Every structure is written in structure tokens, then in C-alpha cells.
Image (tube, rainbow, N blue to C red):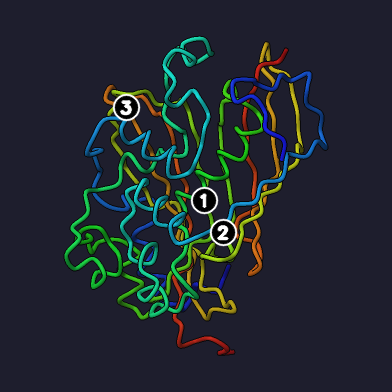
Amino acid sequence: MTTRDPHASLRGTDVAVGDELPAFSLPVTSTVIVAGAIASRDFMPVHHDADYARAQGAPHMFMNILTTNGYVARFVTDWAGPEAVLRKIAIRLGAPAIPGRDLRFSGEVTSKSEAGNECLLELAVRAVNDLGEHASGTVTLTIPGA
Amino acid sequence: MSQQEGDPVRERLEAYVGKPMGAPGVAPDAVNLPMIRHWVDALDDRNPVYLDEDFAATTRFGGVVAPPAMLQAWSMPRPKIAGIAERGGAPTEMSHDNPIVALDEAGYVGTLATNSELEFVRYLRPGDRLSTRATVESISAQKKTSLGRGYFVTWVTTYTSADGEVVGRQLFRVFKFDPSTIGAS
């Protein structure tokens, strides 16, 4: 992965429909799952207690939805930069994100329109692991037009 | 969707549609830097507008803002840790007057989250104190899936600032199912 300047932001003139976001792979560990759950103040045992989660029929402790949304947001702003304004994250939830299964994020620009000095973008995003599609959906954001 | 005709469970659920999903809530704390720092470290999110005051002042935001995906985190109730497993993970004793509990009691004890839609009307800043209210948007007719029979329940939570401005919304959909009906025709 190339490292980009975290202070630089994309402009509408830099983006075209069909552009793909730089791929991002998250090595999911128990620590990643627990850190996200507690930072989001979600104390449900399925997000930190593997035995409890298995007793509920899950394969392992699994990532909570707030954390999934947080990583989707990070995936998008890592690409778009700090001037990006997220408007909407709409995802369908599927396979659980569990320790030992890397979560691979991908995204593509599906729509672009100008509104004044702003550029409105729609992205199709997915996060998949070996179990299947963890999350897929649409992120809507604005970036500066030029 | 004529399946709900002659379905007494679905008929009883109708009373919840359009009604509050639970009591309105007030965030335990205002939006604050320690919780933002905790989140950005947990997710390793290095967007400088979340913590770097000097840089954030040069951006369109004019100052630090909270990561938008933290919206729900601000309003999470203070959990009662003792007994949380026995409550199925519910942070506090749940109100019994909602369709999730009604479906649990009718035998549809399985829960699978299927959809989340977060809408950010504006970014939050340190000091914002959120209130929430949630409304049951819809309940499906009984559906047969690979998990068994069940119902999709959708609710929308509206987040408002202290002066009543709507700052965000979240739609959440779960499938409540009866695991004993897997494979039933």
C-alpha cells in the first residue's frame, strides 16, 4: 500500500466514476474486535467473550456493527482525505468478522455530481473475509469540487 | 404480503408499528476528546480532523469534529455489567414493550442484524449532547429463510442536539427467527 499524506484531500477534479479505492486488508484479531467494541461502548459478550459467542452458535467472538461502520468510514476517508464529509453509510450485513480472518475492503466510485463548489460521490463498498461478504453497501460523501 | 392474514403473531406485532421502540435517551456524556481519542486509537483512524486542533482549524470544519461513525457510541447507555450475559447482552434491563421482546416471547429467539443505515446530517463537535428517540418503522410478514421462519423488524433512531436540531439518523433492521423451524416447509 502506498502511504498518502494524511493532510491531503481529494478534489472533485481528481475523481471519476469507476475509480477504485486503494484496497485495504484488516488483520482481524480478538484485540481488534474488543478494542472496537469497548471504544463504541458496546459491552455485549458476543463481542469480547469467545466462549459466550460460541454458546450462542457463532464461530467465535465477532465484530460489532459500530466497529464495522467505523472501519468503512476509515476506509473511505483514508482515500478521500480530511476535507471529506460523510453523509451516509448504508450497509447490508452478512458473514461475521472473526479473529484470524482478514477483512478485505474494496470500493468503487459509482456516481459523481457537482453541487455548487462541492462534489457529491456515491461509492459501492464491500468488506469480505474467508466466510463470505461481511458488509456491502453504499457510502455517500462530499468532497471539495476543485 | 398476504401472509400476515391469519398470522396471529404478526397481527399482534402490528400494534408496535409507528410507535416508540423504547424510552427516549440522553447520552451519558457530551461529545468529548477522550472518547474520540479512544475510538481513533482502537480503529487506528489517523484522519487529523478528529484530534489535531491546529490542522482541523484550517479545514472546512474549523475545528475538531467527532468521527461520524461514532454517532451511536455517544448514546450507548451506561451498562450494568453484572448479569449482562444472562440478559442476552442487553446493557440494562430492557423495556418489555417492544417488538423484539414480543418476538422472543413468541419463540422467535434468534436475532440476526441485516441492515444498518447511518445518516449524518452534520458532524458533531466536542460539547454536543445528544438525545435519541427510536421508532418502529416496519415489521415484515412472516418470512421463511435458511435460518428458519421469522420477521424482519426495522426501526429508526433520530439523534438530536441539545437545542433540538436533528444531527443524524440510523435505520437498523434485524431478522427475528425461530431456530427450531430451520428446514421446515
| Label 1–label 3 contact, CB within 8 A | no
Residue shown at 56% from the left, 71% from the top: B2
State the CA–CA distance, disc 2 to disc 1. 9 Å
The kind of residue tagged 3 is Ser
Q: Give the foreground label among 2 and 1.
A: 1
* Position of residue A114 measured from the top left corner of the image (x, y, whole percent): 73, 19
Residue shown at 34% from the left, 64% from the top: B99
The vertical placement of B53 against B4, above or below, is above
Residue shown at 26% from the left, 30% from the top: B30
Residue A68's disc is: 1
Mark 2 Cα-neighbour bin, 10 Å: few <14, some 14–19, many ≥20 = many
Residue B161's disc is: 3
Whichever of callouts 2 and 1 sits on the residue coming sooner in the sequence is: 1
State the CA–CA distance, disc 1 to disc 3. 25 Å
| Label 2–label 1 contact, CB within 8 A | yes
Residue A93's disc is: 2
* Position of residue A101 measured from the top left corner of the image (x, y, whole percent): 59, 64
Left of A16 or right of it: where is B32?
left
Mark 3 Cα-neighbour bin, 10 Å: few <14, some 14–19, many ≥20 = some
Q: Chain of mark 2?
A: A
State the CA–CA distance, disc 2 to disc 3. 29 Å
* Position of residue B171 measured from the top left corner of the image (x, y, whole percent): 47, 47
The kind of residue tagged 1 is Thr
